[in-house]
Image: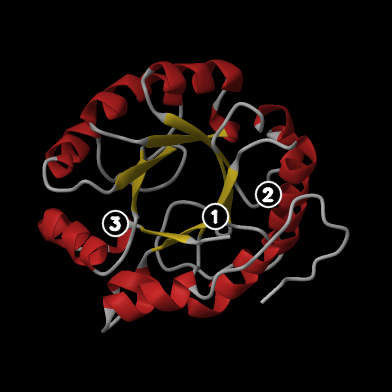
């Protein structure tokens, strides 16, 4: 299973975002994770669609837009038109999550659904066949540089088996406290897309940091009976 690294611009220098994106994509990152915060669902406020539209002119990377906002349905069209490739919303914020997923797909984007550390997998189980990605938060959203919550490894592992049993195409993304050490744990639990902020943007060698987070490729087989991995 090939790992995708998605640097989070939450840890980038906001005065030079275009250059910061180029730096990590030149270093091997495939995705750019764009944290959108509204100051309500999470304490801080970050950026809106106009900034994404401006950045889109300077990058062909996959723009992975993470809506940490109340009423995500009101933001989908503007971010899709700004150049988002994937739009992820939090299940905790959506009264009608299936409708939000439909809106995302109708906008031409892939859909992701996210859940906080304190949210049960049962909240997204009925959505997994309709989304391309499920995002497990391994910190409480809102701030960069938080400590990884190890209890979420079991949730990632359970989600992996849930998706496997459904035989549906849904990638697992993990966001929060990811570095070279914790990336091994989440990859072994079944995650494919790893979001990392300070571990990449704060590293003296960005390319090396991305390589270390990506790690070696894991080989998994569908419907296996145990958790052994092949070299």
Q: Is residue 50 visible?
A: yes
Dot 1 crowding, Cα within 10 Å, few <14, some 14–19, many 20+: some
For the N terminus, give its image quadrant.
bottom right
Q: Which residue is mark 1?
A: 140
Tag 2 secondary structure: loop
Q: Residue at x 79, y 70 (%)?
A: 228
Residue 164: image x %, image y %?
Answer: 75, 45
Residue closer to the observer: 211 or 178:
211
Where is 171 relative to 38, above or below? below
Outermost right residue: 225
Q: Which residue is mark 3?
A: 9
Q: Quadrant of residue 30?
A: bottom left
Tag 3 secondary structure: helix
Residue 106: image x %, image y %?
Answer: 42, 16
Q: Residue at x 22, y 30 (%)?
A: 82
Q: What label does residue 118 carry, if any? A: 2
Mark in front: 3 vs 2: 3
Q: Residue at x 57, y 46 (%)?
A: 171
Q: Is residue 179 visible?
A: no
For the C terminus, give its image quadrant.
bottom right
Going from N to C along the chain, the mark reached first, 3 or 2, is: 3
Going from N to C along the chain, the mark reached first, 3 or 1, is: 3
Name the side, left or right, on which 198 lies relative to 41: left
Dot 2 crowding, Cα within 10 Å, few <14, some 14–19, many 20+: few
């Amino acid at each position: 299973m090939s790992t995708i690294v998605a640097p989070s611009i939450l840890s980038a220098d906001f005065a030079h975002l275009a250059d910061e994106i180029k730096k990590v994509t030149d270093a091997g990152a495939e995705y750019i994770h764009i944290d959108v915060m509204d100051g309500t669902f999470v304490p801080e406020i970050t950026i809106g669609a106009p900034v994404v539209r401006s950045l889109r002119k300077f990058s062909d990377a996959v723009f992975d837009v993470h809506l940490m906002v109340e009423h995500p349905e009101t933001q989908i069209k503007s971010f899709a038109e700004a150049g988002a490739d994937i739009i992820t919303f939090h299940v905790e914020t959506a009264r009608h999550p299936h409708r939000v997923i439909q809106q995302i797909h109708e906008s031409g984007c892939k859909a992701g659904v996210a859940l906080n550390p304190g949210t049960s997998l049962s909240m997204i189980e009925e959505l997994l066949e309709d989304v391309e990605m499920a995002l497990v938060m391994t910190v409480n959203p809102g701030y960069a540089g938080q400590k990884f919550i190890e209890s979420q490894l079991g949730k990632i592992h359970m989600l992996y088996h849930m998706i496997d049993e459904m035989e549906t195409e849904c990638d697992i993304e993990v966001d929060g406290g990811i570095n070279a050490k914790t990336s091994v744990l989440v990859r072994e639990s079944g995650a494919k897309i790893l979001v990392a902020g300070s571990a990449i943007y704060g590293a003296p060698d960005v390319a090396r940091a991305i390589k270390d987070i990506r790690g070696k490729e894991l080989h998994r087989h569908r419907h296996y009976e145990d958790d052994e991995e092949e070299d």
